[in-house]
Image (cartoon, rainbow, N blue to C red):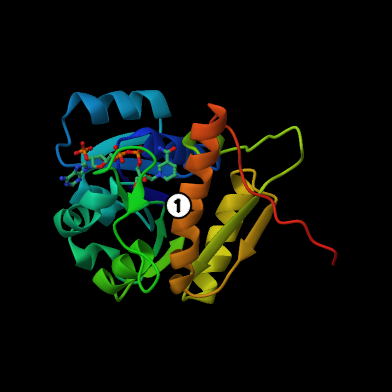
Amino acid sequence: MKVGILGTGDVGKAIAKGFEGIGYDVMIGSRDAKSDKVLAAIKEVGAKASAGTFSEAAKFGDIIAICTLGAATENAITLAGTDNFSGKVVIDVTNPLDFSKGMPPGLTVGHTDSAGEQIQRLLPKAHVVKALNIVGNPDMINPDFPDGPPDMFICGNDGDAKKKVIEILNGFGWSSVIDIGGIEGSRVLEPMTILWVLYGVKTGGWRHAFKMIKKS
Ligand SMILES: NC(=O)c1ccc[n+]([C@@H]2O[C@H](COP(=O)([O-])OP(=O)(O)OC[C@H]3O[C@@H](n4cnc5c(N)ncnc54)[C@H](OP(=O)(O)O)[C@@H]3O)[C@@H](O)[C@H]2O)c1
């Protein structure tokens, strides 16, 4: 299987390593396929990783992970070519963070819409699943916490796509993945990131994750 990762930041690299670890061929996409950043990223990820433009990476992947700056995601998708996403599972890891007023950030969209829904509207023929946006990149793969395994919440409109993403997340070491419904669930998952950030600002630590406590 092949995955196209759109994004050369810490998240793109972490997710790329995760896919490498479960046997996927990985292409990391960037605005410039020869930039120092993308070349360093593929070197860090491993032997099976290659570099490309956003468009080449989207074309390459049977599955695509969007790991771009929130404010730049629409541009990255346009550069990638919307047709290259058709019929594919698309994992949306982005958060629409607004740093214009400093820390902690706000969100550029919320309550009645979300980045997840915007991406699904941009890519009507793709199956967008929001996942991994509520945890820091160092814990996206093999999350290991002394208080026990955290939960990952996902949402999306297509049941088969969510099944595939759950399988991938299980491979990444997430033993508990909770499906909260359609892609509009991103209206809840994206603000959870602000809660995650506020706790980090307050404690000065950035290695925390969410767990839902259940009676049944
Ligand atoms: N950092 C975390 O721990 C964390 C955790 C959960 C979710 N997230 C979310 O994951 C996403 C990625 O975060 P990150 O920290 O890895 O990296 P980032 O700095 O937010 O994004 C880097 C990527 O955005 C692309 N980009 C920047 N400006 C662009 C533009 N004008 N047009 C097209 N593409 C552009 C860059 O392209 P080039 O490669 O061409 O430079 C690069 O690939 C964000 O949405 C973030 O909110 C982050």
Q: Residues within 10 Å of mark 1 (few under 14, many from 20)?
A: few
Image-based side of 67 in relation to 167, left or right: left
How far across and how far down the image is residue 171, in percent?
61, 47
Q: Nearer the viewer, residue 43 or 146?
A: 146
Instruction: For residue 88, say whether it is visible.
Output: no
> What count of labels does the image hold?
1
Residue 139, quarter of the rendered image: top right
Q: Quadrant of the C terminus?
A: bottom right
Image-based side of 199 in relation to 112, left or right: right
Kindly state the secondary structure of the residue where label 1 is placed: loop
How far across and how far down the image is residue 92, in percent?
40, 57
Residue at the image point whose x is 46% and y is 76% from the top: 157
Instruction: For residue 185, say whether it is visible.
Output: yes
Ligand 1 positioned in quadrant: top left
Residue at the image point whose x is 64% and y is 48% from the top: 174
Q: Nearer the viewer, residue 37 or 167?
A: 37
Furthest-right residue in view? 215
* Callout 1 amino acid: Met
**Figure check: 14 above or below 2:** above
Label 1, on which residue? 1
Residue at the image point whose x is 21% and y is 58% from the top: 74
Residue at the image point whose x is 58% and y is 69% from the top: 180
